[in-house]
Image (cartoon, rainbow, N blue to C red):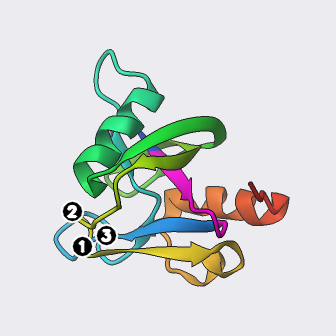
Amino acid sequence: MMKKVKVCGAVIRNDQNEILCALRSPTMSLPNLWEFPGGKIEEGETAEETLVREIKEELGCTIEVYDKIEEVEYVYPHIIVNLITYEAKIIDGRPQAKEHAKIEWIPLDVLQQLNWAPADIPTVKKLLANKIYK
């Protein structure tokens, strides 16, 4: 039986309605694919608490977490990922790529041009279909 992992991702917007996207490094699993920053939900932690912790660790800034956008279960060859994405906004600090190859602010209408990790694609599609502008 395959291992199942529960993770969450933050759809972080700036004042220009651009989305912060993170490029996975060549040494990570799913190398060189784009994702919404976030990480694994630890025992006893809510998804929102995980996002605050992970974004502090990965990007060095503090976020506020808002509404859930999407929940996806994606079966990779060796693992099943349950990904929950949430709207979020930076409330303190400036994001830096500490673990990723790079991070970029991407306009909403350009998101589909990136090479996304498969589990993140439903969130991209939902953002574009709903044209969610904050």
Count of labels in the image: 3
Task: Identify which amino acid the numbered label 1 is placed on.
Answer: Ser
Image quadrant in which the N terminus is located: top left
Distance between the alpha carbons at the discs numbered 3 and 1: 4 Å
Answer yes or no: is residue 22 visible: yes
- At x 65% / y 57%, what residue is drawn? 122
* 93 over 112 or under it: above or below: above
Task: Identify which amino acid the numbered label 2 is placed on.
Answer: Glu
**Dot 2 and dot 1 residues touching (CB under 8 Å):** yes
> Which residue, as the protein is rendered here, is positioned at the far front?
92
Foreground residue, 49 or 27?
49
N-terminal-most mark, 2 or 3: 3
Asked if the stretch drawn in magenta spans residue 57, the answer is: no
Residue 24 found in image quarter:
bottom left
On the image, the x and y values in percent for residue 4 come to 37, 36
Classify mark 2: helix, strand or loop. loop
Q: Which residues are magenta?
A: 9-17
Answer yes or no: is residue 1 visible: no
What's the mark number on residue 25?
1
What's the mark number on residue 24?
3
On the image, the x and y values in percent for residue 90 come to 47, 50
On the image, the x and y values in percent for residue 32 come to 33, 78
- At x 31% / y 76%, what residue is drawn? 102
**Dot 3 and dot 1 residues touching (CB under 8 Å):** yes
State the residue position of label 2: 99
- How dense is the environment of label 1, judged by Cα within 10 Å: few (below 14), some, or many (20 and up)? some
